Image (cartoon, helix red, strand yellow):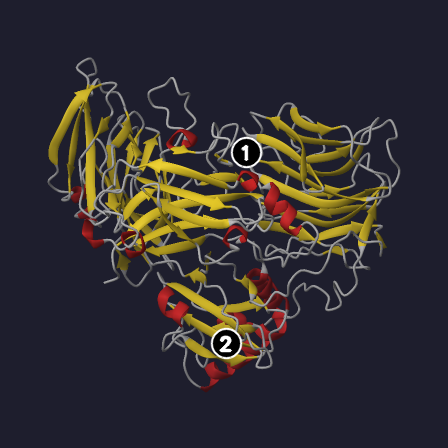
Amino acid sequence: MYKKLMSLASIMNRLNLDVWKSYSIQSVGKASLFKNFVLVGYLLVASFRLTAIPAAYAEDMYALEVGVGMTVTIDDDDDVLRLSSYTYELWLKDLEGPTGSWRRVFHKGLNNVNTGRGPLLSLRPDDPGLHFAHSTGSAQQTANVTEGVPLNEWLHIALVLTDLDGDQIIYQDGVEVARNDVSGLTDATQEPVLQIAAANAASVVVDDFRIWNYARTQEEIQADMNQEVAGVEEGLVGYWRFNEGQGTTAYDLSPYENHGTFTDAIWTTDAAPISAGKPKVVASRPDPADDTLIEDTWVNLSWSPGDLAVSHDIYIGDDFDAVNEGAEGTFIGNQTGTFIVVGFPGMPLPDGLVPGTTYYWRIDEVNEAEPNSPWKGNIWSFSVPPKTAYFPDPADGAEGVSIDVKFNWTGGYGSKLHTVYFGETFDEVDNATGGSAQGSTTYDPGTLRMAKTYYWRVDEFDIIETHKGDVWSFTTEGAVTAINPANGSVDVTQTPVLTWEPGFGATHEVYFGTDATSLELKSSGNLGSESYDPGQLEWNTTYYWRVNEANSANADSPWTGPLWSFTTANFLIIDDMESYNDVDPADPASNRIFNAWIDGYEDPTNGSLVGYETPPFAEQTIVHGGNQSMPIYYDNSVGYSEATLILTYPRDWTENGVDTLTIWFRGSSDNAAETLYVALNGNARVDHDNPDAATITRWTPWNIDLQTFVDQGVNLANVDSITLGLSSVTGGIGMIYFDDIRLYPPAP
């Protein structure tokens, strides 16, 4: 993703710096200090020899004319553009109109239609329309529109793929104009290259080319199609403005710095109708990238400054909360440069980075002349590998593992030899000693039994000492598989129903409890009854469970299932939107979101509609937590829009002393600013104190003191319904999302 660390190493080697090769962080004395000084000096010089965006970039607004022989090629060496869900956005001006031939604007992957393209955008041969294709590996599926591409006028285009088995969508000027239900698409056959105007190129002008790694909504597309984005937005994986005006490099302004190459480029100042975005006030583009693994005891940190920054406050430490709060010991100074080395004597963390440690860092941008300064930065992190083995394959807790599996792992920091222990019980493997060391990080345990849990451990030797590894486990194919709650889940409701996918068994036994070493038999049953209701559980408690199976017709029977766990929430869950599905109402398992939240579908006085017209009915991209949220469309021309959930549990809103209702919501800048409200039992209503709440574009918690409902006569021990709605101010329309409706006790 980021190449600066490798580039620094290669630069130092090209400069023949012996100090680079001989430096040891444990060395002491005057000679060592001189080496430190020389090394750091060369690091500083080397960092500025790396590829950088020209200082004059983007001072003028340009667009790029492309066509036959005039191309842009982005090699995508790190393969970040191989996506199974995406949004491609660009501004386009057609300079010639239909020619009777297909005219290609861009394509990702191989040029061959049937093997590797995804996506491809072409202009249609005989009408002013668009052709959006993505490969299945042997053919292609397409979405088409036959009109709407004007001659010599700017048009904004967005191509959206929701999933490889989802929808292809075309937007023109922010309006959906085509949608195709697809299946069997692939991203596996793509080569890591993106070409604009390659073979059979269209004669067009392009501008502000963006790639996102998710399916953007119409509201998101409309919100920023006419303005530049900062380049650091979540999900943005490619951003080429084409404002260079000269040279052969197409600069990528996303954090991935995936720069391309121009061939015979022609720029024009007749740019797309895009205004400058808001100033980027926070630091961005950390290098190393957030959550990077650093296999060394030092690191050079750099970042892109905010537009208004004069200097930078730097915080670093091994505790997220401490760095986030700027606690004592995390502030290491203010400087004007955007580069700092840590882990050397005389530098921050002078004793070196500690293996097995995750470090957090933050840059606050400072400008004393600005009243909003300082601007607090995001928390980034990097980790130094532990001295023990890590990244096991199969992963710890893996299920459905092949009986012919081969073990792989990453050796601990500085390790030279590895000793593998393998067995059928945790204690057997944990207590094992005296194994044979090996040089490779692979191990063949032989053919294993079906539907069985195994344990393994790898000890690492770094010439000085042996570092005992963790005990990992996995379960082979044919065993039961947890469905709900998933293994390791947290914030689980106190009234869960445990479900699982059966294995080879014809009968089963369910073991459950809070002590993993002594679970109690709680239930038994036959094939087809794979569920267990443990009743009301304690708050903030970890529970363990296991399903054993038996089948008298199978010689390997019985089978002891893997151990699973989950932790209940320290709050009450009213609705987290995770239980809803798209199953047909005739099926007893059906639980469609609009059948639970009653909207205005058959009520002409209520302008709300819950969910979408086609599956998935719940929102699965714009979510606060988990995998789903609830979308509500509102049309207040009838006066109000609301949806109501009839409660079964929890109805006692005094349990454990809860005193705060929290509702997470997210609106859109295009929404009408109607009054957001919540009501209990159909009459006790509280309005949001922000009249523009429906226009907020980020997930926002709405915390409500339950006393405000008591003051309106609500008996909190018997709450039978909750209503979410928007009352009319302008009679406008919009879409708002809700998620994670919870009740919290007082803070301890």
Residue 159, located in which quarter of the rendered image?
Answer: top right
Residue type at tag 2: Asp
Establish if 240 lies above or below 52.
above
Mark 1 Cα shell of 10 Å, populated few (<14), some (14-19), many (≥20): many
Label 2 near label 1: C-beta < 8 Å?
no
* Residue in the foreground of this view, choosing between 446 and 214: 214
Kindly tell me whether residue 82 is visible in this rendering.
no
* Of pointers 1 and 2, the one earlier in the residue sequence: 1
| Residue at image coords 25%, 55% | 745
Image point (24%, 30%), residue name: 452
Q: Is residue 11 above or below residue 134?
A: below
User: Residue 74 or 181: which is nearer the viewer?
Assistant: 181
Gap in angstroms between the C-alphas marked 1 and 2: 42 Å
Near-viewer residue (592 or 255)? 592
Closer-to-camera residue (683/189): 683
75 shown above or below 24: above
Kind of element beneath mark 1: loop
Q: Secondary structure at mark 2?
A: strand
Q: Which residue is mark 1?
A: 163
Q: In the rendered view, tell whether residue 217 sits above or below residue 356.
A: above
- Quarter of the picture containing the C terminus is bottom left
Pointer 2: what residue? 313
Residue 490, horizontal then vertical, whole percent: 29, 46
Q: Farthest residue toward the bottom?
A: 30
